[in-house]
Image (spheres, helix red, strand yellow):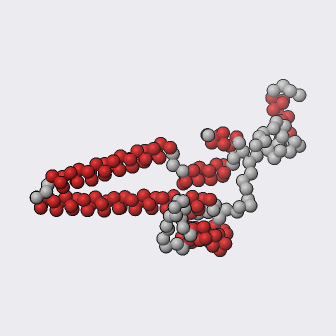
Amino acid sequence: MTDDELKGLGLTDEGLATLKNDLAANFVSKSQFDEVTAAKTAMETQIADRDKQLKTLKEQAKGNEDLQSKIEALQNENSKQKESYEGKIYQMKVDNALGKALTAAKAKNAAAVKAMLGMDKYELADDGTIKGLDDALANVKKDNPWAFEDEKKKPTFNFSGFKPGESADGDTKKTGAEAAADKLWNAMHGRF
């Protein structure tokens, strides 16, 4: 939807800015997601092919100790890179789960609330959530209610729109300036 369409639904400029910031901070476009997924799949295929090639080369190089040691060094390096890659993927999952939890808890500033959590290590549960996060969030929310949106305060939208003959505040009585403007408008258009 365009900005004008959202404003037409009653969204204020402040609400529109908040919506845009939230979308930019918490969501990835489909094209970016597809791009990263394709790159990940390609990298995993390349790693598997490289490991197969090293295994084949190791079998062919039996008897040549120098070549065997180089192949083993490459295999060790590959396994370290794989562990590093898996660690980064795990950290991305943790960051994503933490971001979702902070958004669901309506944290005003995710980085500040994360610092207040006091959790040294984040460990993923089987269901994709972070172990112990709910309790830590509840404690932070209890001690620092200012860091979270008020759950009772719900955004209100006015879908009624403009009604001819009403002033800006919805009152049908015209102010002196509005009445004078109407009189001038009618006089300019030959309506007396």
Q: Is residue 92 above or below residue 35?
A: below
Along the horizontal axis of the image, is 74 left or right of 37? left
Along the horizontal axis of the image, is 146 left or right of 119? right
Residue plotted at (26% across, 62% down): 76
Q: Is residue 49 above or below residue 102?
A: above
Quadrant of the image occupied by residue 4: top right
Quadrant of the image occupied by residue 142: bottom right
Say which of 15 and 81 sits in front.
81
Residue plotted at (64% across, 70% down): 138
Say which of 118 and 20 sits in front.
118
Say which of 25 and 36 sits in front.
36
Place of residue 97 in the rendered image (x, y in percent of width and height, measured from the top left) = 53, 60
Place of residue 89 in the rendered image (x, y in percent of width and height, measured from the top left) = 42, 58
Place of residue 186 in the rendered image (x, y in percent of width and height, measured from the top left) = 84, 30
Say which of 187 and 77 sits in front.
77
- The total number of labels drawn is 0
Q: Is residue 51 visible?
A: yes
Quadrant containing the C terminus is top right
Residue plotted at (35% across, 61% down): 84
Along the horizontal axis of the image, is 157 left or right of 85? right
Residue at the limit of the structure toward the left, as seen here: 64
